[in-house]
Image: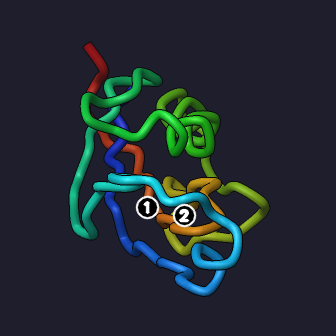
Amino acid sequence: MKKVKITVVRKARYNDLIEKYENPIEHACDIEEGRVFIANGAKMPDGFCESAWESVSPFVFALAHGAVDFYGGWMKDKRSAMISCNDGFRPVSFLLESTDEDAD
């Protein structure tokens, strides 16, 4: 099993949807663009959002176990995936990349 690099590529915010539908909450998403996490195999990295992990973990698990070429050529790098979290108000896009480093 390998480690998987998770990079926060983009964080969107839909203020019109937030204003119309969301109850006010503090610290809904503190993650910042450019932040890098390393998943040790299929284990959630420290500080990673649990809700986002639900969205990305199947792909992290697959990459950690050597899967490639998701959806038949979707990604230029066959050992990667671009996955977004499931927050409809503040979606975050993550680039997942398998590494050559063995998981602990």
Spatial CA span between label 1 and label 2: 5 Å
Q: Quadrant of the C terminus?
A: top left
At which x and y percent is residue 53?
Answer: 51, 37
Task: Tell me the element at label 1.
Answer: strand
Image quadrant assignment for residue 41: top left
Residue 81 to residue 15: above or below: above
User: Disc 1, disc 2: CB below 8 Å?
Assistant: yes
Mark 1 or 2 closer to N-term?
A: 2
Above-or-below relation of 61 to 14: above
Residue under the image location 30 percent in, 56 percent down = 31
| Residue 31 as seen in the image, left or right of residue 58 | left
Residue 1 seen in the current view: no
Callout 1 crowding tier (Cα within 10 Å): few <14, some 14–19, many ≥20 = some
Across and down, in percent, residue 60 comes to 51, 38
Front in this rendered view, residue 17 or 52: 17
Mark 2 Cα-neighbour bin, 10 Å: few <14, some 14–19, many ≥20:
some
User: Farthest residue in the front direction?
Assistant: 24
Identify the residue position indicated by label 1 in the image: 95
* Picture disc at residue 82: 2
Q: Quadrant of residue 98?
A: top left
Tell me which amino acid carries mark 2.
Met
From what the image shows, is residue 47 above or below residue 73? above
Residue 87 image label: none
Task: Pinpoint residue 73: horizontal percent, then vertical percent.
Answer: 70, 69
76 left or right of 3? right
Q: Secondary structure at mark 2?
A: strand
Rendering coords of residue 97 (x, y %): 41, 52
Q: Is residue 6 above or below residue 46?
A: below
